[in-house]
Image (cartoon, rainbow, N blue to C red):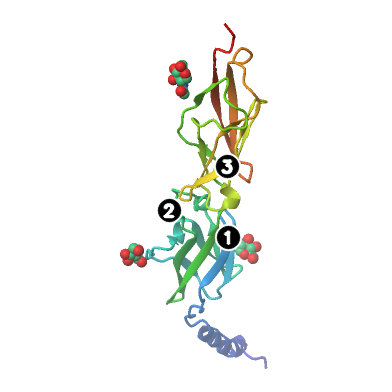
Amino acid sequence: MARPEWVSLLVLWLTVQPHRSLQVQAQTEPACPDISTVRKNNWPETNIELIISQDAPGVSEVYWAPYVDTNYSIDASQYVDVTFNSTAQAIEFTALPSLDGVRDYLQKGYPTLAQLTGTCRMICGSDIGEFQFILLVQDQNTASPQFGSFPRSVNVSEVFPTGLVLPDLVIAASDADADATNYALSFAIKEDSPFSPTEPVKTSDVLPTYTTQLKLEKPLDWAKNAIYQLTVTAQDPGGKSAEITITVNVVDVDTAQP
Ligand SMILES: *[C@@H]1O[C@H](CO)[C@@H](O)[C@H](O)[C@H]1NC(C)=O
Ligand SMILES: *[C@@H]1O[C@H](CO)[C@@H](O)[C@H](O)[C@H]1NC(C)=O
Ligand SMILES: *[C@@H]1O[C@H](CO)[C@@H](O)[C@H](O)[C@H]1NC(C)=O
């Protein structure tokens, strides 16, 4: 005589049941993983890029926690996005466009702040964990040279001696980058002229500023050329540049014999 159908159903139920209860036990609230300080050294100021991926199994959600300001760091949450990648089971930090030029002079005052700090909060079941994120930012060449305010013209006597520097004109330009490899300026004159720019002199460490002057290389002659329009360029090591026009008026001196 065949067994009634409900008997095999009962047998099946009895064998499945222990597995199900085991699974329920495994699903008890996961505690947040212990993530010590996440640190990334010398990440350049940049547009959107993945900065770091930090393994964090069991996390379901992550976000920036309220930030406590200090004198030496900037709140990373303005510059870095934090998300949980459930596929990779990792917390991912991504640079935001606001990180661009963050170390430039006047971006965040002086001295420029190279360290971003933030507190992240993780949610893992009903557990909440926190860890600190520190990002040391490397200066990128984001700032361009800018000429300062000084007279754009100068008078020079046609008998001014060669080899000397025109005393009445000091050309100044600044570059807001944080490292000399990005701000050190050099000057040039585009046109062929009797003048050459002197070696740049650094005159300010706060906003990096360099000056140059015009040195007379060849004798002047008012009758031949009474005015020079010089295009002066200032260029940083990365090739970012600016230019201005300087007018040099040659002043006639009575050189004819009576
Ligand atoms: C920041 O620096 C100033 C002056 O050095 C000091 O008085 C102040 O306590 C500092 N603040 C913090 C949060 O460290
Ligand atoms: C999440 O991680 C996986 C595996 O590493 C990766 O392929 C994917 O692009 C990531 N997703 C996002 C949104 O970053
Ligand atoms: C140059 O000389 C002219 C004429 O004497 C004068 O008007 C002008 O102010 C001078 N410019 C400078 C920059 O000294």
Does the image show residue 157? yes
Mark 2 — residue?
A: 110
Q: Amino acid at mark 3?
A: Pro
- Please, which residue is most extreme toward the bottom here? 1
Q: Nearer the viewer, residue 137 or 167?
A: 167
Q: Amino acid at mark 1?
A: Trp
Sequence-wise first label, 3 or 1? 1
In three-dimensional space, the C-alpha distance between marks 1 and 2, rounded to whole angstroms, equals 20 Å
The residue lying at 64 percent from left, 91 percent from top is 3
Sequence-wise first label, 3 or 2? 2
Between circles 3 and 2, the one closer to the viewer is 3
Q: Amino acid at mark 2?
A: Tyr
Q: Nearer the viewer, residue 55 or 178?
A: 178
- Element at label 3: loop
Mark 3 — residue?
A: 200
Between circles 1 and 2, the one closer to the viewer is 2
Q: Are marks 3 and 1 in contact (CB under 8 Å)?
A: no
